Amino acid sequence: MKTLIDHTTKLLTWTSRLTHIVISLALVSATALLSALFFHDIYLAIQSHSLIKGFLHALGILLLLWTMVELINTELDHLRGGAIDVAIFIEVALVVVVREVIMLPVAETHPTWIDLGMWSGAALLLGLTYYLVRSGQHLLKTAG
């Protein structure tokens, strides 16, 4: 039985490391593609003389790039032996919601009041969740 547990542990460790390599490569690829898209959006905005709309699209891409940087830093910390901070994923979700709110004025369809309420509610709930998580982490740090 001990041999089976040892082999299973080795398999799981190997799978975990391989998966983190795949995640790392995906993050690098996505960052490169988003960077290219960011500069392409700026180029299109200048070409079409629609700077406001182009700026908002580029800002949306920039927020996604910021998200990628946060995820890359989290993955680096994890690969170096650190714990994964759940607050990072709340930040990422908050940035995605903020991006969607920023993109509403240039969306193909006009948002309804319900859409605005849902996005605002999501931002409020994520902000509250983030505050509670960070406050709890701060309390644990000062108590310990």
Image (cartoon, grey):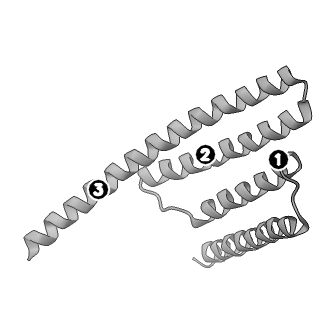
Residue at 20%, 60% in the rendered image: 10
Residue 78 x, y percent position in the rendering: 46, 54
C-alpha span from label 3 to label 2: 23 Å
Residue 111 x, y percent position in the rendering: 87, 59
C-alpha span from label 3 to label 1: 43 Å
Whether residue 74 is situated above or below residue 142 in the rendered picture: above
Quick one: label 3 or label 1, which is nearer the N terminus? Answer: 3
C-alpha span from label 2 to label 1: 26 Å
User: In this orientation, which residue lies closer to the viewer: 30 or 113?
Assistant: 113
Three-letter code, disc 1: Glu
Tell me whether the residue at label 3 lies in contact with that at label 1, contact meaning CB atoms closer than 8 angstroms.
Answer: no
**Mark 2 = which residue?**
68
Tell me whether the residue at label 3 lies in contact with that at label 2, contact meaning CB atoms closer than 8 angstroms.
Answer: no
Whether residue 11 is situated above or below residue 47 in the rendered picture: below
Residue at 84%, 52% in the rendered image: 109
Three-letter code, disc 3: Thr
- In the rendered image, which quarter contains the N terminus? bottom left
Badge 3: how crowded within 10 Å, few (<14), some, or many (20+)?
Answer: few
Which numbered disc, 2 or 1, marks the residue closer to the eye? 1
